[in-house]
Amino acid sequence: MPERDSQLVADEASEHQPSGLGSHSKDAVRLSRQTILLVDDTPSNLLAFQAILERDGVDIVCASSGRAALEILLEREVAIAILDVQMPEMDGLELATLIRGVDRNRRLPIIFVTAGSRDEQHMFAGYQAGAVDFLFKPVDPDILWRKVDAFLELDRQRGELAEAL
């Protein structure tokens, strides 16, 4: 993926962030950095999602294939995964099934992104593979941002609860 000017990415991301959502005081205490995993075989899609979702306290890791995503998941914990459904070699449905097959990833929220069919049978297969949601291309940046923000908040709360116990 080509390197981009970090200010340009930050400016693009801020254009799409709804005011008041996900903005946390710099004085707030972070338990740890959260990670978003983006998986898409199209580099421009990865760049666009990265620009929309970039925020303080969150790492975004990108994979251009299912195999690369699985390697990332062996090395790090992620708070949410956003997977393209239609990829060569290993599609998003197969990847989600493999992700769910690992105990530590069993509860990982997976959002599928697709330019494909909106028929119920196709979506049902995605939910059976482990999706918590589907987004259709072209993706509305505000909807993507709000959905991811909600799952990051749930991950933060789960972490705080685990630490309190």
Image: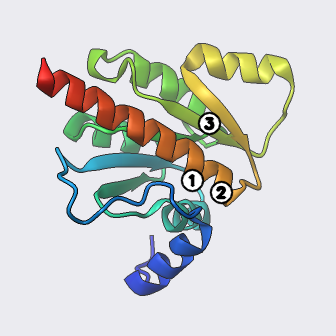
Q: Are marks 1 and 2 in contact (CB under 8 Å)?
A: yes
Q: CA distance from mark 1 to mark 2?
A: 5 Å
Task: Determine which of the numbered discs, if any, sits on residue 145 in the image.
Answer: 1
Q: Badge 2: few (under 14), some or many (20 or more) residues near its Cα, within 10 Å?
A: some
Task: Determine which of the numbered discs, if any, sits on residue 39 in the image.
Answer: none
Q: CA distance from mark 3 to mark 2?
A: 16 Å
On-image quarter of the N terminus:
bottom left
Q: CA distance from mark 1 to mark 3?
A: 14 Å
Q: Amino acid at mark 1?
A: Trp
Instruction: Single out the mark in the foreground, 1 or 3.
Output: 1
Q: Amino acid at mark 2?
A: Asp
Residue at image point 27% right, 21% down:
104
Q: Nearer the viewer, residue 108 or 94?
A: 108
84 on left or right of 138: left
Instruction: Single out the mark in the foreground, 3 or 2.
Output: 2
Which corner quadrant of the image does residue 56 belong to? bottom left
Residue at image point 50% right, 39% down:
150
19 on left or right of 137: left
List x then y, in percent, for residue 141.
66, 59
* SS at badge 1: helix
Task: Write down the residue under mark 3.
Answer: 112
Task: State whether residue 51 is above or below residue 129.
Answer: below
List x then y, in percent, for residue 135.
70, 41
Q: Amino acid at mark 3?
A: Phe
Q: Are marks 3 and 2 in contact (CB under 8 Å)?
A: no
Earlier-in-chain disc, 1 versus 3: 3
Task: Write down the residue under mark 2.
Answer: 142
